[in-house]
């Protein structure tokens, strides 16, 4: 079992295709790992054992018939519990949807199934994707496999923890302000936020519609690229979906190089609040890029300093609108419907019981920002700042091919450390938010361990809109250089569970 769960997704798929392993063997090994360690980690909210084994058997039957298998056929995956899945629960980490079983699959879920990827189950997350630590889940926090007293990032901490604890070789996350990249950074894994609109949002429960983006999570850059090609592509069911070919991300990952590339370093992505070990590893990464043949270009993007403030007006405003559908009348939790309360009272009682504190906080902030007399001063001003951020990115990409930065200002903090300090929690997304506001693509990959706490540090790579392949070209080159220096992927150093 140990040998199987330590394989990369690419290696696993190759062994299944050759007949060296069966998809059922691979699935059973990961289900056994989940049973052995997830009581400690709490990465999963729901494990679909029967469904996963049925999918695996179907892959083995295809191979027995001589049918050609896809590049990820039979490979297990952990799916963030924000994508609808026909026949198994989708809770979005919230009590208001506890026990809800969708009657349809999200487009992303359909594409995974069509590619014969084996869905092991649904992973824990901050309620409605609102958080940076997975502590806001209505079902309890997830632990970081490097240190179970630390957070695994958020909102997709369940997906990142499943990867880092070898419960799955692949996972899906969503990124509204950094919720794929920040968990990847603090767990020593790889996470990619594709260009906004590159992966369908149909069937993905909405938090902030102009920011939300699903994407791949893995333990290697190539694995992330293989998953990216499976889930990306135009979807007529999503009005924001981009009708363009998917960039050749697998080809880029296989030919990783930075020779002759211009790599930007933004001065706004360092300063007060950044952990010394994070800056040290980032500076070493920049030196490595230069050593590999890249030209380093200093950039000044002044509007980035306003990104956090703009985000925490735009995202709550959109969440206030999107979450209005959870009224206790149509589906999900219903409280107070005993014949003595009006419809308005039932809605109020349901939301009081079903939404957690962080969701309520953001709904109230967003409703206030959108209210008469305040719209222009708050939401309208934030959208103007968003335009300035996009313009700063456009100017930067006239000078460079990609931008690099630390993914997060610090390594993983202790569970409970920032629970009563929302502002400190929000600062975890300081480096990731500008990319969501502009809509371009970004990746986080491991770049070492911080010397003061021996916890993973993430390197963020940012590329222009629909130039996602550049992420993989640079990421693969950096990853290969790290492996050459240390002899193995960083994730191998994660403590055994």
Image: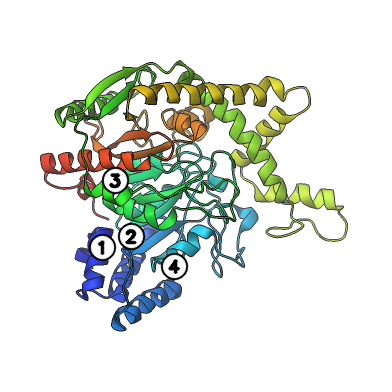
Q: Position of residue 240 (x, y in %)?
A: 57, 45
Give the distance between the C-alpha atoms of the residues marked 4 and 2, in whole angstroms: 22 Å
- CA neighbours of label 3 inside 10 A, class few (<14), some (14 to 19), many (20+): many
Dot 3 or dot 2: first in sequence order is: 3
Give the distance between the C-alpha atoms of the residues marked 4 and 3, in whole angstroms: 34 Å
Dot 1 or dot 2: first in sequence order is: 1
Residue 116, can we see it?
A: yes
Q: Answer yes or no: do the residues labelled 3 and 1 have beta carbons within 8 Å?
A: no
- For this orientation, the residue located farthest to the front is 244
Q: Which mark is residue 167?
A: 2
- CA neighbours of label 2 inside 10 A, class few (<14), some (14 to 19), many (20+): many
Q: Position of residue 350 (x, y in %)?
A: 73, 51
- 422, above or below 187, in the image: above
Q: Helix, strand, or loop for circle 1?
A: helix
Q: Which mark is residue 125?
A: none
Q: Answer yes or no: do the residues labelled 3 and 2 have beta carbons within 8 Å?
A: no
Dot 4 or dot 3: first in sequence order is: 4
Query: Mark 3 sits on what residue?
Result: 146
Q: Which mark is residue 114?
A: 4
Mark 3 vs mark 1: in front: 1
Dot 1 or dot 4: first in sequence order is: 1
Query: Mark 1 sits on what residue?
Result: 5
Nearer to the camera, 257 or 479 = 257
- 450, above or below 246, in the image: above
């Amino acid at each position: 079992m140990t040998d199987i769960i330590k394989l990369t997704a690419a290696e696993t798929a190759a062994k299944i295709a050759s007949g060296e392993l069966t998809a059922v063997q691979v699935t059973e090994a990961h289900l056994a790992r989940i049973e052995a360690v997830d009581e400690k980690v709490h990465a999963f909210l729901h494990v679909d054992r029967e469904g996963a084994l049925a999918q695996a058997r179907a892959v083995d039957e295809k191979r027995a018939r001589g049918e050609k298998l896809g590049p990820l056929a039979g490979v297990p995956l952990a799916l963030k519990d924000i994508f609808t899945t026909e026949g198994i629960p989708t809770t979005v980490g919230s009590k208001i949807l506890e026990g809800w079983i969708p009657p349809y699959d999200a487009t992303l879920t359909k594409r995974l199934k069509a590619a014969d990827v084996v869905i092991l189950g649904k992973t824990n997350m901050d309620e409605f994707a609102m958080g940076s630590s997975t502590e806001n889940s209505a079902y309890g926090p997830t632990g970081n496999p490097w240190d179970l007293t630390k957070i695994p990032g958020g909102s997709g901490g369940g997906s990142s923890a499943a990867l880092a604890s070898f419960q799955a070789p692949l996972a899906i996350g969503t990124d509204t302000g950094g919720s794929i990249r920040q968990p990847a950074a603090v767990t020593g894994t790889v996470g990619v936020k594709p260009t906004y609109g590159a992966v369908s949002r149909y069937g993905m429960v909405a938090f902030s519609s102009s920011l939300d983006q699903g994407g791949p999570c893995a333990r290697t850059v190539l694995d992330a690229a293989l998953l990216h090609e499976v889930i990306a592509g135009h979807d007529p069911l999503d009005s924001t979906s981009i009708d363009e070919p998917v960039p050749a991300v697998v080809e880029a990952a296989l030919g990783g190089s930075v020779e002759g590339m211009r790599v930007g370093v933004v001065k706004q992505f360092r300063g007060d609040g950044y952990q010394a070990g994070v800056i040290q590893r980032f500076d070493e990464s920049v030196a490595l890029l230069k050593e590999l043949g890249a030209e380093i270009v200093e950039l000044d993007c002044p509007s980035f300093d306003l990104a956090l403030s703009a985000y925490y007006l735009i995202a709550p405003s959109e969440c206030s609108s999107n979450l209005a559908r959870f009224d206790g009348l149509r589906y999900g939790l219903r409280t107070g419907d005993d014949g003595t309360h009006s419809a308005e009272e039932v809605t109020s009682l349901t939301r009081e019981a079903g939404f957690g504190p962080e969701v309520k906080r953001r709904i109230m902030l967003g409703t206030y920002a959108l209210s008469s007399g305040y719209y222009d001063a708050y939401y309208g001003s934030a959208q103007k700042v968003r335009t300035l951020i996009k313009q700063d990115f456009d100017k930067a990409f006239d000078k460079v091919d990609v931008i690099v930065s630390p993914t997060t200002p610090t390594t993983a903090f202790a569970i409970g450390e920032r629970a009563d300090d929302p502002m400190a929690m929000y600062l975890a997304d300081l480096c990731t938010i500008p990319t969501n506001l502009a809509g371009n693509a970004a990746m986080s990959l491991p770049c070492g361990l911080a010397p003061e706490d021996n916890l993973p540090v993430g390197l963020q790579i940012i590329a222009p809109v629909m130039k996602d392949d550049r992420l993989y070209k640079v990421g693969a080159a950096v990853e290969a250089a790290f492996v050459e220096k240390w002899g193995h992927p960083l994730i191998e150093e994660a403590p055994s569970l």
